[in-house]
């Protein structure tokens, strides 16, 4: 289940509020055996991510005797205790178990569990959010790499202000009576952002200059929009600009290797790309999703001053649309 973007509810009646976590959405299940082998962890687009996060191994033992499916976010914290998507990047892209264990020592992650979908043979998705939360809090106690965060049933404005002061991403407002609707983006969950973020699909790239000569210079990005002729197709995009900042040297190299198999002669953008950019572009089949921070949308529909935050391997590119601001 996903949230829509929006403003705080006009009043708190019937709503609860949670922090919006800046990480990787993961649904995890345990089979009751109490073993690491009995744990499954799947990203939003169906990737098996359990080998990437060995910290989750103990969750099976913690929930031994129960068959459980939970929803939550894998996060990495910075030195100030804030979730940091960029810090999570070196962990997300390593599927080799041994390498993941090595990186876990340097960059640990935590699983923030915020919903309960199944418990001991019972489908809990039809239950109200308030009831699911009550069951979850009684089931999952804080562990070395997992937690059930607090939710607040009043004063969403105060939580949003506190989140803003801490430099966090935002909050999510959830209807107390809402059921869990798998696969749906529902107005019963409303994400209220402090910082402007936008997921985009990479449709091409240009080579760098100066200190980045011979390497990736900028990503050419876009999104899907069924209202624009052709842009509702999985391989066709609305052009949203170029992203040329926010990369580390290692990430430039990783992205370059990642994009090589996606090279194509066909431009995936159905709206105009500036001619000087198009002449230098290497087009890509639009299969890679990245997240950006930006100042605003320009009148012609481009991201102003976008900065790269990281690749979203947990997103289906066909579902990436322009978020309301």
Image: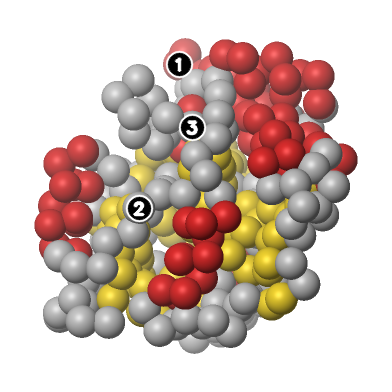
Q: CA distance from mark 2 to mark 1?
A: 48 Å
Q: Which residue matches tag 1?
A: 210
On residue 174, the disc is: none
Q: Let me know if residue 266 appears in the view.
A: no
Labels 1 and 3: the sequence-earlier one:
3
In the drawing, does residue 39 fall left or right of residue 8? right
- In the depicted view, which residue is nearer to us: 293 or 184? 184
**Residue 78 x/y as whole percent:** 38, 25
**Residue 291 x/y as whole percent:** 48, 48
- In the depicted view, which residue is nearer to us: 120 or 290? 120
Q: Let me know if residue 70 appears in the view.
A: yes
Mark in front: 3 vs 2? 2
Say how many tags the image has: 3
Q: Which residue matches tag 2?
A: 150
Secondary element under disc 3, as helix, strand or loop, is loop
Say which quadrant the N terminus sits in: bottom right
Mark in front: 1 vs 3? 3
Q: Is residue 60 above or below residue 99?
A: below
Q: Residues within 10 Å of mark 3 (few under 14, many from 20)?
A: many
Quadrant in which residue 250 is drawn: top right
Quadrant in which residue 316 is drawn: bottom right
- In the depicted view, which residue is nearer to us: 256 or 283? 256
Q: Which residue matches tag 3?
A: 76
Q: Residues within 10 Å of mark 2 (few under 14, many from 20)?
A: few
Say which quadrant the C terminus sits in: bottom left
Secondary element under disc 2, as helix, strand or loop, is loop
In the drawing, does residue 68 fall left or right of residue 251? right
**Residue 55 x/y as whole percent:** 66, 30
């Amino acid at each position: 289940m996903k949230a829509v973007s929006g403003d705080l509810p006009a009043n708190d009646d019937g709503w609860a509020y949670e922090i919006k976590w800046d990480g990787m959405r993961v649904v995890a299940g345990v089979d009751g055996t109490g073993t690491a082998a009995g744990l499954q962890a799947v990203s939003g687009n169906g990737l098996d991510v359990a080998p990437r996060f060995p910290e989750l191994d103990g969750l099976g033992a913690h929930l031994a005797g129960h068959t459980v499916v939970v929803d939550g976010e894998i996060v990495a914290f910075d030195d100030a205790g804030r979730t940091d998507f960029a810090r999570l990047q070196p962990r997300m892209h390593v599927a080799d178990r041994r390498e993941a264990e090595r990186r876990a020592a340097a960059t640990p992650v935590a699983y923030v569990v915020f919903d309960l979908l199944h418990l001991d043979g019972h489908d809990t998705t039809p239950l109200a959010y308030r009831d699911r939360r009550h069951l979850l809090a009684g089931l999952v106690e804080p562990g070395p790499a997992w937690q059930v965060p607090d939710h607040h049933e009043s004063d969403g404005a105060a939580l949003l202000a506190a989140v803003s002061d801490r430099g966090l991403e935002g909050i999510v407002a959830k209807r107390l009576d809402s059921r869990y609707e798998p696969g749906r983006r529902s107005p019963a969950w409303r994400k209220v952002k402090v910082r402007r973020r936008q997921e985009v699909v990479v449709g091409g790239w240009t080579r760098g200059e100066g200190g980045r000569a011979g390497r990736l210079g900028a990503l050419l990005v876009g999104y899907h929009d069924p209202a624009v002729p052709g842009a509702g197709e999985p391989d066709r995009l609305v052009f949203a600009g170029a992203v040329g900042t926010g990369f580390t040297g290692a990430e430039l190299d990783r992205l370059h290797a990642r994009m090589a198999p996606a090279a194509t002669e066909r431009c995936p953008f159905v709206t105009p790309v500036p001619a000087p950019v198009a002449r230098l572009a290497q087009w890509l089949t639009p299969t890679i999703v990245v997240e950006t921070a930006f100042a605003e949308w320009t009148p012609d529909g481009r991201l102003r001053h976008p900065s790269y935050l990281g690749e979203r391997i947990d997103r289906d590119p066909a579902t990436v649309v322009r978020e309301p601001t």
